Image: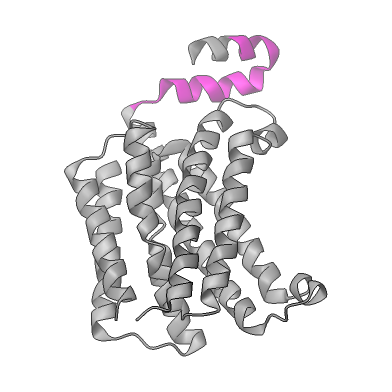
């Protein structure tokens, strides 16, 4: 790390400021970068579940022909939201471990369930609600174990 | 109960999804070392990860033709077990008691949502 910081200092002064800053990495900045990583993962779930929701709409509305597939607006939206989610997931993985970031993605189930009820008219039983709360509790534990 | 064809499709999707996350993590580590924004995203691991994510999405969409989204979506939770193993075995990440409890709660939650 210090070696790369030194070599970039010769080439680009602006870059080196950023690098030495991260090289310091006091306990406080380490904690805030973990929080940033967790926030990116949570934000990622919002986008991927919207993506899944549009994919379900696509699955219902799609007509199986080449033109029908590439012009389905829900399919396009589905992949677009998924792509944004993926970038956010990558940003999250830069600062937290895979075993932290990946379980947080399960929060997507909660958003998807709420969207399915609200927009698709699907119904959840009380025991399924218990499952939703169990997922939320699990994600809280994962977040606590990382920070 | 879940439609058998939907089950097979979603399971294939789950494996592809777990490996997608694994390669994304490998890509994210490499990403931190690259300066150029384009070369950050043109990394082999990142591209492989994205490719596997898209492929898994195709399988998920296929399975959704035969089953409700509120059933399919929690099924994808099996990926959490696979990813936990991949992180421990291949990435040597520490997985403490709290993390295992969290993953267990998530899996219990997904089963409760999926099987009723």
State the image quarter where residue A69 is shown.
Answer: bottom right
Q: What stretch is highlighted in magenta?
A: A7-26
Going 25% across and 44% down the picture, which residue do you hit?
A145
Classify residue A18 as left or right of residue A74.
left
Total residue callouts: 0
- Taking depth in this image into account, of A68 and A120 the one nearest to the observer is A68
Q: Where is residue B25 in the image (x, y as percent from the top left)?
A: 48, 39
Whether residue A63 is visible to the viewer of this picture, yes or no, is yes
Classify residue A17 as left or right of residue A32.
right
Going 49% across and 64% down the picture, which residue do you hit?
A46
Quadrant holding the C terminus of chain A = top left
Principal secondary structure, stretch drawn in magenta: helix
Position above or below: B90 against A2: below
Going 67% across and 71% down the picture, which residue do you hit?
A75
Classify residue A24 as left or right of residue B115.
right
Position above or below: B49 against A5: below
Q: Position of residue A143 (x, y in %)?
A: 30, 50
Q: Does the magenta stretch include residue A115?
A: no
- Taking depth in this image into account, of B13 and A83 the one nearest to the observer is B13
Whether residue A112 is visible to the viewer of this picture, yes or no, is no
Going 64% across and 63% down the picture, which residue do you hit?
A79
Q: Position of residue A45 (x, y in %)?
A: 47, 60
Q: Where is residue A6 in the image (x, y as percent from the top left)?
A: 57, 9
State the image quarter where residue A80 is shown.
Answer: bottom right
- Taking depth in this image into account, of A32 and B22 the one nearest to the observer is B22
Q: Does the magenta stretch include residue A11?
A: yes
């Amino acid at each position: 790390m210090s070696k790369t910081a030194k070599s970039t200092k010769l080439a680009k002064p602006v870059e080196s400021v950023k690098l030495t800053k991260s090289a310091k990495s006091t306990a406080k900045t380490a904690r805030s970068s973990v929080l940033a990583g967790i926030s990116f993962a949570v934000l990622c779930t919002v986008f991927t579940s919207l993506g899944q929701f549009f994919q379900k709409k696509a699955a219902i509305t799609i007509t199986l022909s080449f033109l029908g597939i590439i012009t389905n607006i829900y399919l396009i939206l589905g992949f677009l939201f998924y792509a944004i989610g993926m970038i956010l997931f990558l940003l999250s993985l830069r600062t937290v471990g895979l075993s932290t970031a990946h379980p947080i993605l399960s929060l997507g189930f909660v958003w998807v369930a709420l969207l399915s009820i609200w927009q698709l008219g699907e119904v959840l039983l009380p025991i399924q609600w218990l499952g939703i709360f169990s997922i939320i509790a699990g994600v809280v534990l994962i977040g606590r174990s990382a920070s | 109960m879940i439609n058998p064809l939907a089950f097979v499709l979603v399971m294939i999707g789950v494996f592809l999804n777990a490996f997608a996350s694994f390669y994304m993590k490998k890509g994210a580590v490499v990403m931190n070392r690259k300066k150029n924004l384009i070369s950050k995203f043109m990394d082999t691991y990142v591209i492989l990860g994205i490719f596997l994510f898209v492929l898994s999405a195709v399988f998920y969409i296929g399975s959704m033709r035969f089953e409700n989204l509120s059933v399919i979506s929690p099924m994808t939770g099996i990926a959490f077990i696979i990813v936990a193993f991949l992180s421990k075995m291949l990435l040597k990440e520490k997985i403490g008691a709290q993390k295992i409890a969290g993953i267990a709660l998530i899996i219990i939650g997904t089963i409760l949502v999926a099987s009723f």
